[in-house]
Image (cartoon, rainbow, N blue to C red):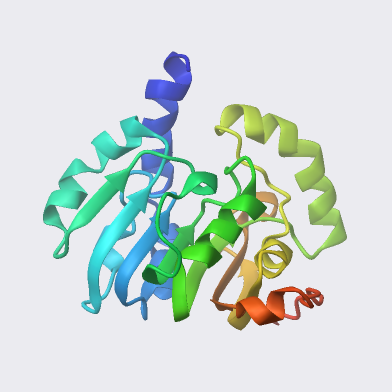
Amino acid sequence: MGLYENWVLPRFMNLMMDQKVVAEERKKCLATVEGTVLEVGFGSGHNLPWYPGAVRKLVAVDPSKQSAKLARKRIAEAPFPVEYVAVSGEYIDAPDASFDSVVSTFTLCTIPDPLAALQQMRRVLKPGGRFYFVEHGRSAEPEVLRWQNRLNGFNRTIFGGCHLNRDVSRLVQEAGFEFDDVQQYYLEGQPKFGGFVTRGVARALAPRDLATHSPPEARPKRRS
């Protein structure tokens, strides 16, 4: 990796992910997370201040060691132990059914194989555990989607592989999750092509149900 990927991009993303509107999404997403938690796409630790008191431990997965260095102060201030693991989400090295909660925020856009990563997240969830996520991605408006498709290559080049047009709700269902709650809307003050978000809570389907699982079209609640 070059100078841009190693030094410039992590610092730029650290600033971008510190916006107030993004922090509000994190707060809403993480409000009911509990137990031993796996966070995929930890970045520089912007979620840490928003985890509730019911969290006992966090295992933080992210391939960027430079971002982990930027997270040191937040990790030191966390009220629970934080274990950092420098791997991508497709390669989670943890036993089956080992986490009470799994978290992904503004991460699935960048992971090279998001479906494989989501399948790993499902694998490590305990029975009854929940997957908490908020992600930007494919707009439901055809005109906005056209712009997402046009700008996607440029966006991937500038922002470390970030896709504008991934269908988050569909990916979550294809990976073997079922929604408890899901909402889709545009972030206030953000350009529509980059500000369409999907936020929700999902549970892993039981192994006996996966063989016959055929993901339906998502029917999320919409917010203007």
- Identify the residue shown where x is 38% and y is 49%: 42
Location of residue 113 with respect to 33 vertically, above or below? above
Q: Position of residue 166 (x, y in %)?
A: 71, 52
Residue 75 position (above or below residue 64): below
Task: Give the residue drawn at x 66%, y 54%.
Answer: 115
Is 56 left, or right, of 43 in this rendering? left
Compared across the picture, whether 202 is left or right of 27 comes to right
- In the image, residue 171 above or below residue 180: above
Along the line of sight, the residue nearer the viewer: 138 or 175? 175
In percent of the image, x 47 and y 14: which residue is there?
Answer: 2
- Relative side of 180 to 115, left or right: left
**Picture quarter containing residue 181?**
bottom right
**Residue appearing at x 67%, y 61% in the figure:** 168
Q: How many marks?
A: 0
Q: Residue furthest top?
A: 2
Q: Quadrant of the C terminus?
A: bottom right
Location of residue 152 in the rendering, given as x and y in whole percent from the top left corner: 73, 38
